[in-house]
Image (tube, rainbow, N blue to C red):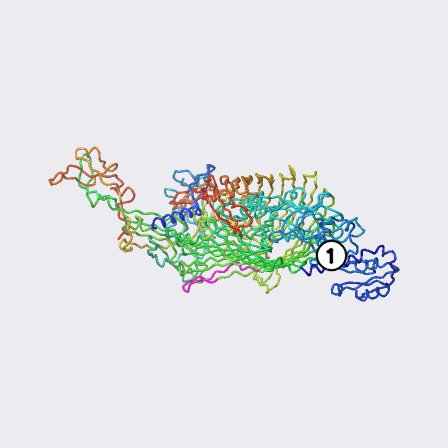
Amino acid sequence: MRMKTLNWKNAFSWLLMLLVSCVEPYTPDVLDAPNNFLVVNGFININGPSTIQLLRTQNIYDESQPLAESGAMVKIEEEQGPAYTLEEQAGGYYVLHNLDLNILKKYRLYIRTSNGKEYVSDFIDVKPTPAIDAITWKPVDDAVQLYVSTHDDENNTWYYRWEYEDTWEFTAAYYSYLRKVGDEIVYRDLKYDNIYKCWKTEKSTTIELGSSVMLSQDVISNYKLLTIPATSEKVGLQYSILVKQFALTREAYQYWEILKKNTESIGTLFDPLPSQLTGNIRCVTDPDEPVVGYMSASSMQQKRITIKANELPDDWRLFYPRCAPLDTIPVDKAIDFLGETGGYLPVGEVFPENSPTQFPIGYTYSNRSCVDCTVRGTNVKPGFWE
Amino acid sequence: MAQVYKILILLVLLLASTVAASNAQDRAPLITGTYSNVPFQDFVKDLEAKTKYSFYFDAAAVDSLVVNITVQEKPLQVVLQQALQSTDLKFAISSEKQVFITKERAILTALPQGFFNGDDSSAGSEPAVLAETFVPQDTKKKNAVSEIKLYEIGAKTGNTSGNANLAGHLRDAKTGEAIIGAYVYIESPTIGTASDQYGYYSLTLPKGRHELKVRGMGLKNTRRQIMLNADGKLDIEIEEDVRALKEVLVEAEKDRNVSGLQMGMERLDIRAIKQVPTAFGEADIMRVVLTLPGVKSVGEGSTGLNVRGGSTDQNLILFNDATIYNPSHLFGFFSAFNPDIIKSVELYKSAVPAKYGGRLSSVLEVTSREGNKKKFSGSGGIGLLTSRLTLEGPIIKGKTSFLIGGRTTYSDWLLKKLPNDSFNSSTASFYDVNAHVSHEVDSKNSLYLTGYLSKDRFKLSADTLFRFKNENASLKWKHIFHNKLYSVLTTTHSHYSYDISNDENAVNASTLAFGINQTSLQADFNYFPNSKNTVDFGASSILYNVAPGSLTPNSPESLIAPDKLQNEKGLESAIYISDRFDISQRLSISVGLRYSVFNAMGPRQAFTYAPNVPKTEGTIQDTVSYGSGETFATYHGPEYRLSARYGLTDNSSVKVSFNKLRQYIHMLSNTATMSPTDIWKLSDSNIKPQVGDQLALGYYRNFRANTIEFSVEGYYKWMHDFLDYRGGATLIMNHHIETDVANAEGVAYGVEAMLRKSTGKLNGWVSYTYSRTLVRLNDPRVSEIINRGEYYPSNFDKPHDFTMISNYRFSQRFSTSLNFTYSTGRPITLPLAKYYDGSTERILYSDRNQYRVPDYYRLDFAMNIEGNHKIRKLAHSSWTLAVYNLTGRKNPYSIYFKSEEGKIKGYKMSIFGQPIPTITYNFKF
């Protein structure tokens, strides 16, 4: 009887496979046209440092780093008012510290690139950002679901965008108290030479947008920011997230929404078609030249929360680092075989059975990736870590 | 039986008493008199007084008749002729000075020549023939079943020259159902017509003896010997060709291809439809329509049709005359029509008859069967995902029949069985029910009542529930005034609505709903004045009521502000007249004019926008308020329908047609396919109606005694003011939708070639189409300019298209079908460059629709195994085994690029990307 049920289930899964679509990678070969348009990232921060990054577009399959636009003159201009020049830094960054703009005025960005082309944004309204009310989380279906809530008492914001940076603590699979220095295997200084416990930080890669225009009050209640599966390394020990909130104008919201539609929310059976994306920055010297980016004038609000593994449901099987079992190597071959920072690293000592002695007869060792957490993160504890 | 016998005796006596007399009319007295508004009975009394004749008539038949004549010394014959001229009454004068006034057919006062010279051995049956032939019976028409018997139509008169009209119904001998689209004709001279959707035909033929032939799809070819003396009726019962049951038969089209005037029209019989393999083993009308030349879709799993470069909302889909807004189930995986209740499907791609209007590209008319008028029967099918059952039978034998069909899916139950959680909490189900009653009130009046209901429910991962439903009803009253004129009065109601509920987060829990209601009244008249002309005229009116959207909170904690878009109301009215004129054997033309008017009606708060700039929220100038029923925008215009045919030889012809159509209702959708969440929008002060013109030219030729037909049709189409969308348009809950759409113009042109073999062991068709569809948005006063104002390919521009449908019958019980389709990939907008936006890579897209997805091709195979053909059997059954997409080609349904973990990745999604075998059991009892 049991056998029979199973067969039925297989048959049904097979049937559903017919219904369910099949997705595979696709690489059209027409995308080789060389083009490099100006890309403008960042926003005009009304009461804090403004950072604008100028880059160039690349071909889809170009694996190199995006080209930074250096040597440009970048200014923030007030409508019928003063202009503030930004200072160039490495990587195409242009920065202006401590600007305090008048929220009743309109501002625009002016760029003159080193090849003499001029670009301006539209004059934009200043939109201050209300504070984040709370970042909350709860376990939902074997995952940690994180939410952001905010509101504007003055019912004036309505459109929001979020970015976040998440940081988590993790360990290597094996705890090594040894290290090879020159021709010797020595004990590791665990305080200053920790390669077991590390931290990793990532920036959000998705566009998170929320709007309260459908509501009678300007309230965002529990916007689903992200989900982290229970088995993710992120929540294996301790997790921290810094959420940044930006107020948007309606037009800016629409721009981000199209960008999101074009690049994220597609691939369903009823796709919207990708639509042309026109930002609010244009080339003055060549009106036909596309410019990528959308300038907003706003402030930034931040909030951080921390989730510890012991706060998660008891029945969750959390992430535990795993590696192939340790190998051993005799003492006389260890120096030639093991590496100082790469290759195979020593983990522990091996002593002869039933005859405890001071001297090991060999060492256990493993791949660097199983021993050294700095392969993927940093062993410098972040300042905000509790 | 005794009754009949008595009548026969009486008749024989009556006839006998008239035999002896001869040349009575020679001594007829002359009559003089003026009759002005004189009741017929008084008129007769006067005549009886003036002459020595006695009159015999049915008082009830003449009680409303008045006589208006003036005669001066005329014989009785002439006087009566004048008096009864404009009525259907006939008279006969016997030698015994008796005048018989009868309805429609004159009594013969003498036996036909050679009556007594007949073969004595058949005397037993002769009186019956006699009665049938010569005596007006209650039904006043014949059910002609014999191929060798000579049927006399009308009374013999001295005048054997000139024409007479023959009309009647074609019916299935087994079920009594009307037979549509069968060809009734004589061969010398070639005069013929096709039966209409009620099985009615009307032919004007030279008087005399003819062999009347009848041919139709899946029917045994049959013929009747007729002697046409005067106008009369002949109902013909035709047997189904059992042997050909599963053969694709497009036989009715045989002659139509070359000799019919209609071009750009395809008719498919349900038998042909059932032959074509589909993904889920169930005959699917929409998918078969897609194999016809000139019909395309954006991709699989979508039942939206693109006919000759038109968008999916430009097709008028009629089910028994009621408009169907969403012809699909489960997001297009199934069509909304239950194959068991369908009789035929007609698609007009060009030369759209003047009777139809309101959509730019095509008319798809789906007709259900009437139900078996003779005995109770049923049919059904059991498939892997759906099952269906249809019951039918007479309510009053021979007069009233019913047909009821239902269909449902059990995929819901199936999803629940799956171990995966997200499937477990998903549900997908649909059902549809059809009911049809047809009633023959008397020989002149018939009523047809249809009801249709379909519902879909689709829940994805436990929190979002989609529901949509179609509700349709239609009532038709067909009235035959006389042989040459009949009318059909139709009233229909169509309802389509959907809602989407989301209850995952109590604060945002809400329901979004859309609905459209349409009520229509239509009167159509068909008039056959003579053998050269067929005149259609009529009027129609449609009242639309659209609830474009409402958003309501559906939990007490929900903060969703209830929102409702203003209801829209509109009245679309039209009158039309068209005449088909057969100028000569070679040349026939059809001229039609339809004039349509659309009124957008209040109550409404309408925005007015600054002129000559794109409509945006910023250019709103004023809000004008209109009261209930007040017309605030009117559009109207003529729609021309012209077509002509010239026969080059007996088996080849050229045809040309020109059409203009107007469309006052638009579908808003920013997906390429037709999805259940599309919104229909009426024209109003800010949205103009769409207008389309089409010129088509075709060459038709039949080979090998009409068994192989060949056609080439070319067309050019202009489309104005159809809706395209601005980038990132918001279509749902938009209070000023005109700011997000733009009036685009388009052209479409192409050539369609088709070779079809309808009979024989191997049959089917091969078609090739070259076509282009281009769109342009270049008016800066209307919208943003797309692709620098140049023409760009529309989403469904697929230049090359090749289809092959082939069937091979190995034996009467075993047949196979192999179908192949190929088409150019549809256009897409591709990402040209990528850039880093500070945290991740993003994409910059190319000009709209500048590139194409890989080509599409698919091979399907099916096998039909019939049970034995014994007539007396509890149930007839058959098995259909089919493999859809035999080669397992992963045809792209959608190609997209998205950024994942900071990298751009391209994906191709295909549905049905592997061979899909299905098995279906069908039964009939």
Q: Is residue B628 left or right of residue A370?
A: right
Decide: is B893 above or below B15. Answer: above
Q: Is residue A37 visible?
A: yes
Image location of residue B865, percent across then percent down: 51, 44
Image location of residue B598, percent across then percent down: 63, 57
Magenta stretch holds residue B249: no
Image location of residue B704, percent across then percent down: 64, 37
Helix, strand or loop at label 1? It is loop
Total labels: the figure holds 1
The residue most toward the front is B121
The front one of B367 and B831 is B367
The front one of A244 and B440 is B440
Q: Which residue is mark 1?
A: B135
Magenta stretch holds residue B550: yes
Chain of the residue where label 1 is placed in the rendered structure = B
Q: Is residue B294 left or right of residue A197?
A: right
The front one of A298 and A362 is A362
Q: Is residue A301 left or right of residue B564?
A: left
Give the class, few, some or many, for how many residues have Cα within 10 Å of label 1's Cα (few <14, many ≥20).
Answer: some
Image location of residue A30, percent across then percent down: 47, 37
- Say what amino acid the circle numbered 1 marks: Val
Q: Give the image quarter of residue B452.
A: bottom right
Start-end of magenta stretch: B545-562
